[in-house]
Amino acid sequence: MEVEVRALVAGLERPAEERIQGWTFWRGTLDGYPVIVSKTLKGMSSAAAATALAVERFSPAAIINQGTAGGHDPALHVYDIVIGREAVNVGAFKTGFRPRGGGSNFAEWKPMDLLYSEGSAGQDPNAWTMHRFPADALLLRAANQASTTYAKGRVVEGVIASSDTWTSELDRIERLRDEFHTSVEEMETASAAQVAGLSQIPFLGIRVVSNNITNSQAYDGQTAPACQAFVIDVVKAYLGARASR
């Protein structure tokens, strides 16, 4: 969303806007190093396409996907930041069989690893597992380093859940958290992580808790610029770490 990129663009030195099909990118520098900001648009398909376009056009050394998210963990509060130790796609499930009139039961659904094999993930029991996209170790270290200066909330490592679903069912959230250890939920990170992984580009997801239905905390739009300020610090820490290697 616009609110999720505005502060990043403002943080660039001499930003220049570039349109590629339906997506917007900004070229600029940060401490003299070339940086691209991408407005991915909402949803898994848009984020994957924007990431693939960025890989082809700009050949990035690393990718950070950032923005707002809803909390799954009751211990997380608005303005807390989750560094994505892992990202998972919680939109890839095989349902249990139920006859007409039998209703639906999410507890019966099995996750599907869509990257497991060339065959049908729905037909192969070996693929009935949650694919986990791990963060790049150097990016994760840079984010933890930057966390010491973030003053608006806590910064924790966790699991970012992504899908084209806005979950408001507390029982469903509880199952996702208990079984897959999800911390927050949003609609982009796992798809961007998948493209980055296939492109062999270091990746990290960072999400700020903008609301948390599990502890009745309402949405706060000012969390978005807070996250972007933190991400700028992460990028600077990462550039410093790369320079010293």
Image (spheres, rainbow, N blue to C red):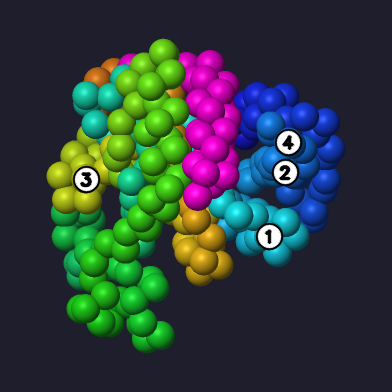
Give, as a three-letter code, the residue at label 3: His
**Residue farthest to the front, as pictured:** 244
**Which quarter of the picture shows residue 160?**
top left
Say whether disc 3 or disc 1 marks the residue closer to the N-terminus. 1
As measured in the structure, the alpha-carbon distance from the residue carrying label 1 to the one carrying label 2 is 11 Å
Residue 42 in the image, given as x and y percentages of width and height: 58, 43
Q: Residue at 80% across / 54% down in the picture?
A: 20
The mark found on residue 32 in the picture is: 4
| Pointer 3 residue | 181
As measured in the structure, the alpha-carbon distance from the residue carrying label 2 to the one carrying label 4 is 7 Å
- Provide the secondary structure element on which disc 4 rests: loop
**Residue farthest to the top, as pictured:** 151
Residue 95 in the image, given as x and y percentages of width and height: 26, 65
Q: Which residues are magenta?
A: 217-245
Give, as a three-letter code, the residue at label 1: Ser
* Residue 140 or residue 179, whichever sits in front: 140
| Pointer 1 residue | 59
Instruction: Please name which of the two marks, 3 or 1, marks the residue nearer to the observer.
Output: 1
As measured in the structure, the alpha-carbon distance from the residue carrying label 1 to the one carrying label 4 is 17 Å
The answer to whether 204 is drawn above or below residue 113 in the figure is above
